[in-house]
Image (cartoon, helix red, strand yellow):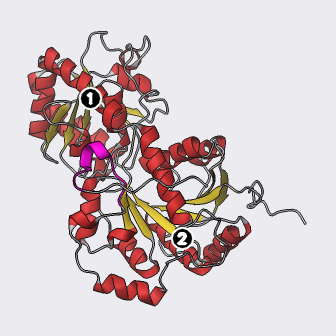
Amino acid sequence: MDKSPQLQGLDTSSQRLHVLEVVGNGIVGGMERCVERLIEHLGQGDRFRFTVLCPFEGDFTDRVRAAGAAVVVVPMPEDPPWQAIQMVTGLVRHGQVDLLHAHLPNAHQLAGLVGRVTGVPVVSTIHGRQIIMPDLEVHRMVGSHLSVVCQHSYYHALGLGIDPEKLSCEPNGVDTQAFRPGPRPSSGLREQLGLPHDAWLVGFVGRLSPEKAPDVFIRAAGVLHERMPDVHLVLVGEGPMRSQLVELIQRQGLQSHVHLIGRIDDVLPVYHDLDLQVSSSNSEAMPLALMEGMASGLAVVATRVGGVPEIVEHGRSGWLVAPRDHDDTAGRIHQMLTQPELRRRMAERARVSMEERHQLSQRLEAVAQRLRLLARPGSTEPRRIGSAPRGLPSRGQTVAQALRQPVQAAGTAASVMVDPAAVASAMPVLPAVQTP
């Protein structure tokens, strides 16, 4: 009998570690790009193979297929339907999956239930700056491992009483070979917008959604326009706030100076076109767009939220401002544009800091070690499908332990994987795991 369409293309004979990436959304956003980069860098050798579980087809599924992953589409609402649980359970058993890796709470719920049924370990990467209740509930019920991407999130999790043995920190990184300083494009945004070649251009790169606060960027543009009327500002990205932002631009009379560009897949020329990058987010963990801009040689003005202070060195590679403070944001933009030597020094430091502290290859190797350790704890032998992972407590034990768990001291985080240059003194580094 032929394989069903959903199971075609799954390699069931490979001895590589088989990771099922359970992805709760399918847009081309920061979380999805993290998954794509993971597959691109780890799926090409003889250590890993990936299948991606996604709620719908689109650009994201096309990209991960091109990166070498198999793709299976399954409904993924906040309360997983029984049909989805059955389907993914069959996929895990048939495809000899070694580890379920979830992204977003709806994916964590589905992965947690299937992991408990099949005995396959579950890890959920928390891409936001805080662990929210749905992720905490799944973690406590099924004993899933939580991986966060910045120190802020790590210590927040410890404050919630999460067992350090079930918690680790694998920060984001940036490909400094792909994102590097370069000349201004000959047919860039200025040409597209009909602006003078020497016009100032300040950019926001990100999703037009409330947590990114693009409205604050536009309000800062209004304050800046009164002091520097020749400066132009662009927003690169799409999202649910677009129509609201159009109205805000019109109310402030900025139609000729604030431009909504829409989504651009190849953002490197955008960074080369900008004089300065601004991140106005209300909530961030470790934003890729900010890291990419800095690696491309841009000084930045960014809000002091989540893991952003781990990226931006205040007064060295950029300025940190309070969230929702459009006046201070405008003031820092004005300072950067009117002091070219300061901006140049900060831009150079931004590039160096990405090279020294946030290299993508090093960060992905830390993720690789974490995935191997969780999938095959204490052994280099493949785990048998349907058997419980070594050392995993029963559901009753997990719940009881979670409910009794006191707040842990920060220094007890023996299992965390971190950037040694940034936080080695606070959180010990996990010993290297031998490749099977």
Where is mark 1, residue-wise? 350
Which quarter shows the N terminus?
A: bottom right
Where is mark 2, residue-wise? 121
Task: Relative to 20, say whether 137 is above or below.
Answer: below
Q: Earlier in the sequence, mark 2 or mark 1?
A: 2
State the image coordinates of residue 127 (x, y, percent, origin top left): 38, 55
Between tags 2 and 1, which lies in front?
A: 2
Q: Nearer the viewer, residue 418 or 399?
A: 418
Asked if marks 2 and 1 touch (Cβ < 8 Å), the reply is no
Task: Relative to 344, say whether 9 is above or below.
Answer: below
Distance Cα–Cα, label 2 vs label 1: 38 Å
State the image coordinates of residue 83 (x, y, percent, origin top left): 64, 76
Residue drawn at the location 64% of the way across and 65% of the way down:
381
Q: What secondary structure is the magenta-colored segment mainly?
A: loop
Does the stretch in magenta take in 425?
yes
Amino acid type shown at disc 2: Pro
- Magenta stretch in the rendered image: 416-426
State the image coordinates of residue 188 (x, y, percent, origin top left): 41, 17
